[in-house]
Amino acid sequence: MSAVPEQPGAAAAATAQFGRAIEPGALDTAHGAILYLEDITVSFDGFKALNALSLDISVGELRCIIGPNGAGKTTMMDVITGKTRPDAGRAFFGQTLDLTTMTEAEIAHAGIGRKFQRPTVFGNHSVFENLELAMKTDKRVRPTLFARLTGEQAAAIDRTLALVGLTEVARRPAGLLSHGQKQWLEIGILLLGEPQLLLLDEPVAGMTDSETERTAELLLGLAGKHSVVVVEHDMDFVTRIARKVTVLHEGSVLAEGDMEAIQANERVIEVYLGR
Amino acid sequence: MNAIATDPAIAGRPAAARAPSRFLGLYRRGGWLALGAFALITIVVLPALHLAFPAGHPLHVSSFWIALVGKIMCYAMLAVALDLVWGYAGILSLGHGLFFALGGYALGMYLMRSIGRDGVYGSLLPDFMVFLDWKAYPWYWAGTDSFLYAAALVVLVPGILAFVFGFFAFRSRIKGVYFSIITQALTFAFMLLFFRNNTGFGGNNGFTDFKRILGFTITTPETKAALFAITAATLTVTLLACRYIVTSKLGRVLTGIRDSESRLAFCGYNTLWFKLFVWTFSAVLAGVAGALYVPQVGIINPGEMSPANSIEAVIWVAVGGRGTLVGAIIGAFLVNGAKSWFTGAFPEYWLFFLGAIFVLVTLVLPRGVVGLWSQLRGRRG
C-alpha cells in the first residue's frame, strides 16, 4: 500500500545496495559530528539568503543560533530539512547521509525532527493521544487499524509526558492547553519520533517567564541524549541554555563560541547585540 | 479549528482499553444495551409480528411500516457511511447517493434478469431493452444472472469507482469545499449518463417490476420480512464495524487528518492511503445499503443519483450529530420519519420544512441531536 518498505532487513539491504541510506540505524556519527554544513549557498532571485555557510554540530550538543532578522536562520533550517535545496555546498547528516539529495520525508525518517514557530498539535485529541500518534511504529493503514498499545509503548509515552511536564494534563484535549504547554507537547511529539537531531525554531516565543524557564530546563535535560539546535531571539533564554552559540549574519557565520566570548565580540556587538 | 469535538468516549481514552477485549470495548454497557435492543426489535420482533399476526390484529405490524422502516434503515446505513468520512476524516461528500445508487443498480441487474419471461413482452430481455429493439444483453450485463456475481458487483463497482476517484483527488490534495463540489458534479454526471436510454440501464424509468429474488417471490410478506431482517442485521454490523474503525488508532489518525493533516504527515503518516481507505470503505457501505434498498422499494432509477438526494443524506447526519455514527442513524430516522408524515399531511411544504430543519440544526444544535443529549446529560451530571 504505502512506500514504506515491508521489512527493515530488506530495506537495509536495499539501501546498502544503492549507497544511500534512509534508515536511522544507518546514521554514522563515528567522527563525533551529527551535522555538517559546508559552503552552503542559497539565493532567491539574486539575494543570497545563505552565503557559503559552514557549520557543524556534534553528537549530543545543544547549539544556539542567533542573528538579526534576515540572517538566514530559517533558510538554514529549510536546507537541513530538505524544504529548500542549496545552490551550492554540501550538507551531511552524520558521515553518510547527503541531505541535499533526500526528500523531506526521508530526512524526517532518518532522524531529523523540526519544530516550527507556531505550535501545531491535534486539538481534538488528548495529550496522550497526540503522543500515541507520534510514536515511532509501523504507520501504514492496516497495522494502524489493528494497533493496540503495548505496555512498553505506554511506558514510553508516560516517560515523555513526565519529561515535557504534561503528566497532569495527559487526558486533556490538546486544544485546551496553554500556549506554552502546546509548545512542550510539540517537543514531546518530536521526541517520540526518536530523532537524532532536533531543530527548534524559536521555542520560547510568546511564552511567559516561568514557561521560558521550564523550557530551558527541558532543553538542558535533552542535551546529551539528543543533539539540539535552537534558533532563538530571546537573549536571556540563550544565555541561560547556551554552551556554544553561533551568530549568523547575512547568510554566513559571523562568530562562534561560548556565550561570554560572543557577547564580548566586537563585530557581533556591532551588527546584532548593539552597544 | 474544527468545532466538532470527538466523541468523549474516544477522547481521553486511557492507555490500554479498559474493556477485556477490543470488541466489547466498542461501547459502554448502556450503549451495548441500546444497540442490543435495537437489533432485537428490528431483526426479530418487527418481522415476527408482521408474519405471526393477521392484518387487523392489534399486534400486527403492517406492511406499510415494514416497508417504511426497512427503507429508512437503508438510508441510515448510507448516513453511517457518510458520517464515517465526513464526521471523522472531515471529507464532506455531496455525492454519496451515487454509490448508493450504483449498489442498487448492481443488484437491480440481477433482479431484472430474475424476471425471466414474466415481463410485459414475454422476452428474456428486460422490457426496456425490448422496447429499444435490442436483441441481446450488452456486454456489461454478462454474468448478472448470477446472484453472487451481482453481489460482488454491489461491492466492487462503488468500491473501484471511489478508489480511483479518491486516488486522483486525494493525491492532488483536493480538499474541503472543492472536493465536495467535485463529488456533487460526479453524481450529477452519472445521473445524466444513466438517464440516457443508450446506457443500457433503463433510462429515466430505471429498473422496476421485479418478480423474485433468489427464487422467492419478492412481494410476499415472508420475503419482505426476511429482507427487513437482513437489512437490520447489516445495519447493526455496519455500525459496529465503523465504531471499530473510529475507536482504533486509525480512527485517531482520521480525526488527525480532519484537524491537522500536515502535522500527521510530519509524524510520518502517508495520509493519502488513510483517506483512500476510509473513502473506499464508506462507498462500499453506501453501495450495500443501495443493494438492500432496491428489492424492498421495488424500483431504482437515476433520480437516486440526483444531487439533492446526496445533500439530503448530509442533512440526516447533521441533524443526528456529526462524528457520532449513532447520530447518523437517529438523524436518518428522524428526518425520514418526518418526511413520511409531512409528505402525507402537507405535501407542498416538505422541502420548506426540510430547509428549516437544516437551518435550525446548524444554528441551534451544531452537534445535532446526539450532541444535545450528551450536553443535557453533562449538565445534569
Image (cartoon, coloured by chain):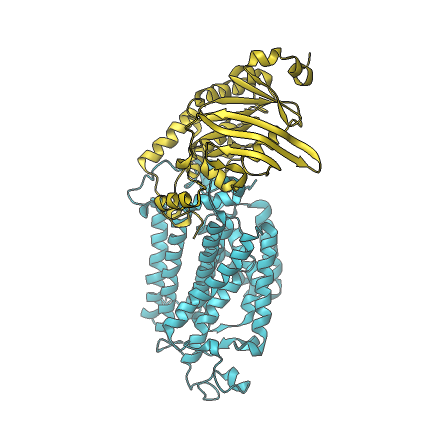
Chain colours: A yellow, B cyan
Residue B110: give x, y in percent of width and height.
Answer: 42, 75
Residue closest to the far left = B20
Q: Is residue B260 at all visible to an observer of this figure?
A: no
Left or right of B32 in this view: B376:
right
Q: Height in image: B373 above or below B216?
A: above
Comparing A228 with A128, the one in front is A228
Quadrant of res B39: bottom left
Residue closest to the far right = A46
Left or right of B40 in this view: A265:
right
Residue B20: give x, y in percent of width and height.
Answer: 28, 42
Q: Height in image: A260 above or below A129?
A: above
Comparing A131 with B294, the one in front is A131
Instruction: Give the position of the C terminus of chain B as an image quadrant.
Output: top left
Residue B143: give x, y in percent of width and height.
Answer: 41, 76
Residue B367: give x, y in percent of width and height.
Answer: 52, 45
Instruction: Give the position of the N terminus of chain B as an image quadrant.
Output: top right
Q: Is residue A157 at all visible to an observer of this figure?
A: yes
Q: How many marks?
A: 0
Left or right of A50 in this view: B212:
left
The residue under the point 41% across, 52% down is B242
The residue under the point 47% across, 59% down is B283
The residue under the point 54% across, 25% down is A230
Comparing B338 with A215, the one in front is A215
Residue closest to the far bottom = B122
Q: Height in image: A113 above or below B42?
A: above
